[in-house]
């Protein structure tokens, strides 16, 4: 292990690091907490880098530790300097992020898909690495084919949020359809209703997101009829049992 103290201005976050950008205020709070811990106890685990030139080092793993130390205005940080290929750098970064950080769904989709590709599309190997069942892992890999702005809706905190199940159903829709617009049109429905609507959308071979509007109304009417039918059956049972109303 080649441990060196390297000046912070010689370091930059690698393109292989899946978490290049902080996501929200929670991330910033975590960085502040980590900085306080480092200030009190020093940096326990060096970050992992690879040398690009005498004045440039790529951060493969440890972005948060780097940002925490940088916020403390320390001149240097302890680094484990390694010599790896691009593929190896990807695997190191992805694996660390999977195990160390609470990733967004967007991060998960991108990370799991990259690992899946790196390990020759072996679902079992990747599921062991990330500690997830192959069935659940397959869901994230399936939706990796969707446009980025659709995948980002998985992490939305507003009414336009979509579920994993809805996203999977969207992968079945023809690429000629604007899937982002389609996803937004489904936001007023439950996850179950959205999946049901998308199945009808695909069966009908629709080519415009606007076609989902009529399908939505039909499904809502069907659900209402089912609800009334179930209520009627419950009343009938009560009457047959002599309880009446």
Image (spheres, grey):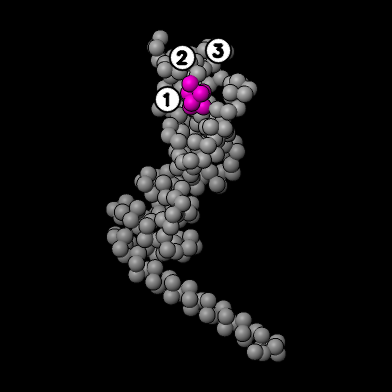
Asked if 134 appears above or below 222 in the picture, the reply is above
Mainly helix, strand or loop, the magenta region? helix
Q: Which residues are magenta?
A: 66-73
Image point 46% across, 33% down: which residue?
19
Element marked by disc 2: strand
Dot 2 corresponds to which residue? 7
Dot 3 corresponds to which residue? 3
Q: Which labelled disc corresponds to residue 73?
A: none
The residue closer to the viewer here, 163 or 21, is 21
Residue 230 % position (x, y): 57, 78
Residue 113 % position (x, y): 46, 38
For the residues labelled 3 and 2, the Cα–Cα distance comes to 13 Å
For the residues labelled 2 and 1, the Cα–Cα distance comes to 16 Å
Label 2 vs label 1, nearer the camera: 2
Image point 42% across, 22% down: which residue?
12
Label 3 vs label 2, nearer the camera: 2
Q: Residues within 10 Å of mark 1 (few under 14, many from 20)?
A: many
Image point 70% across, 88% down: which residue?
243
The residue closer to the viewer here, 244 or 212, is 244
Quarter of the image where one finds residue 36? top right
Quarter of the image where one finds residue 186? bottom left
Element marked by disc 3: strand
Dot 1 corresponds to which residue? 14
């Amino acid at each position: 292990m080649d441990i060196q103290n390297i000046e912070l201005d010689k370091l930059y976050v690698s393109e292989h690091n899946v978490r290049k950008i902080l996501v929200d205020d929670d991330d910033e709070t975590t960085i502040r907490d980590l900085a306080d811990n480092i200030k009190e106890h020093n940096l326990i685990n060096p970050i992992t880098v690879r040398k690009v030139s005498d004045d440039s080092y790529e951060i493969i793993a440890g972005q948060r530790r780097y940002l925490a130390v940088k916020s403390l205005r320390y001149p240097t940080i302890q680094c484990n300097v390694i010599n790896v290929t691009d593929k190896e750098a990807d695997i190191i970064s992805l694996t660390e992020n999977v195990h160390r950080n609470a990733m967004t769904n967007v991060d998960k989709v991108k990370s799991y898909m990259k690992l899946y590709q790196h390990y020759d599309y072996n679902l079992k190997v990747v599921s062991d690495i990330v500690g997830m069942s192959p069935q659940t892992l397959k869901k994230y890999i399936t939706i990796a084919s969707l446009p980025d702005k659709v995948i980002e809706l998985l992490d939305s905190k507003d009414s336009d949020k979509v579920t994993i199940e809805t996203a999977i159903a969207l992968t079945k829709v023809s690429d000629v359809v604007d899937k982002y617009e389609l996803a937004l049109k489904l936001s007023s429905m439950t996850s179950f209703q959205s999946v049901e609507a998308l199945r009808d959308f695909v069966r009908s071979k629709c080519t415009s997101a606007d076609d989902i509007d009529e399908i939505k109304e039909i499904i809502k009417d069907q659900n209402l009829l089912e609800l009334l039918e179930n209520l009627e059956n419950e009343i009938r049972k009560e009457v047959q049992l002599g309880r009446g109303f």
